Image (cartoon, rainbow, N blue to C red):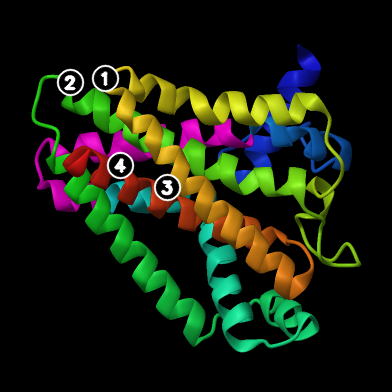
Amino acid sequence: MKKELHIFFTCLMFYTRIPCPKNINHDPDYLNKATRYFPFIGWIVGTISFAFFYIFSLFLSTETAVIFAIIASVLTTGAFHEDGFADVCDGFGGGWTKEKILMIMKDSAIGAYGAIGLVLLFLAKFKLLTESISLFTNSNSYLLVFLLFISAHSISRLAAISIIFTHEYSRDDASSKSKPIAKKHSWKEIFGSFFFGLIPLLALSYFNSKFLLALIPVFIMRYFLARYFQKWIDGYTGDCLGATQQVCEVVYYLSFLLIWKFI
């Protein structure tokens, strides 16, 4: 139990800005095993994001509350995944060879592709979340919003981390901060990822089983992103995982909205 707590806090420290016990560090062994808790971090980020939405929705408009919810998620993770998304936009937008793409993604400066991508990403999140929340008009509305938040964050993280189970790390050196998690994984990491990734969606499907269909477009997008990364850089990097999480989160919101309206 003590070891599992250490693994969990390692995961929490690596993927968020939430304070952890002082004895927790970036031990490669624990960080590799922490993969099993990555989707559970989505529960935490989603809960914090929902808390901000709920508080601000009590005295401000839904649109404003959604903005603060998005801000909360960015602050909680330190824009960890958004940074990866921007780097992927710059790298794949401006590079035409594996070496060039990896070099651009490693650069800490943000370019035009990254800036434009982030603007469109946040606009999509804002609009899709606002429209989805506006559909909830019954007594279970806040519960449904809560489940929407945590399921979006957990499913998108599951989609991202699953790339590690099926593809190879692209860089030949250990220059990326994601390298410690780019090793082989046991069944515990795979089982833990899918368990924590799917539970919130299963809870949401209790209200309507058709919401399970949202898994299909999310993992279709995951498949094509992984295939695209494999084609250009022979695998993935930490930035690729961050980009996958962000894109799949948006796809999940879009899928949820379309399922509610048309199915």
Residue 122 image point, x, y percent: 35, 63
| Magenta-colored span | 38-66
Counting residues from the start of the chain, the first of labels 1 and 4 encountered is: 1
Counting residues from the start of the chain, the first of labels 2 and 1 encountered is: 2
Q: Residue at x 42, y 47 (%)?
A: 73
Q: Residue at x 51, y 28 (%)?
A: 198
Residue identifier under label 2: 140
Counting residues from the start of the chain, the first of labels 3 and 4 encountered is: 3
Question: Which of the 4 image quarters holds residue 56?
Answer: top left
Residue identifier under label 4: 256
Distance in Å between CA atoms under marks 3 and 1 = 25 Å
Please identify the quadrant where the N terminus is shown: top right
Q: Do the residues labelled 1 and 4 touch (CB within 8 Å)?
A: no
Give yes or no for residue 60 being in the magenta stretch.
Answer: yes
Q: Are marks 3 and 4 in contact (CB under 8 Å)?
A: no
Q: What element carries label 1?
A: loop
Q: What element carries label 4?
A: helix
Q: Could you classify mark 2 by the number of other residues whose Cα lies within 10 Å: few (under 14), some (14-19), or many (20 or more)?
A: few
Distance in Å between CA atoms under marks 3 and 4 = 20 Å
Residue 12 placement, left or right of 204: right
Give yes or no for residue 15 being in the magenta stretch.
Answer: no
Distance in Å between CA atoms under marks 1 and 4 = 13 Å
Between disc 2 and disc 1, the foreground one is: 1
Counting residues from the start of the chain, the first of labels 2 and 3 encountered is: 3
The answer, for residue 109, to whether it is visible in the render is no
Residue identifier under label 1: 207
Q: Could you classify mark 1 by the number of other residues whose Cα lies within 10 Å: few (under 14), some (14-19), or many (20 or more)?
A: few
* Vertical placement of residue 134 versus 220, above or below: above
Q: Looking at the magenta stretch, what is its main secondary structure?
A: helix
In the rendered structure, which amino acid carries the disc numbered 4? Phe
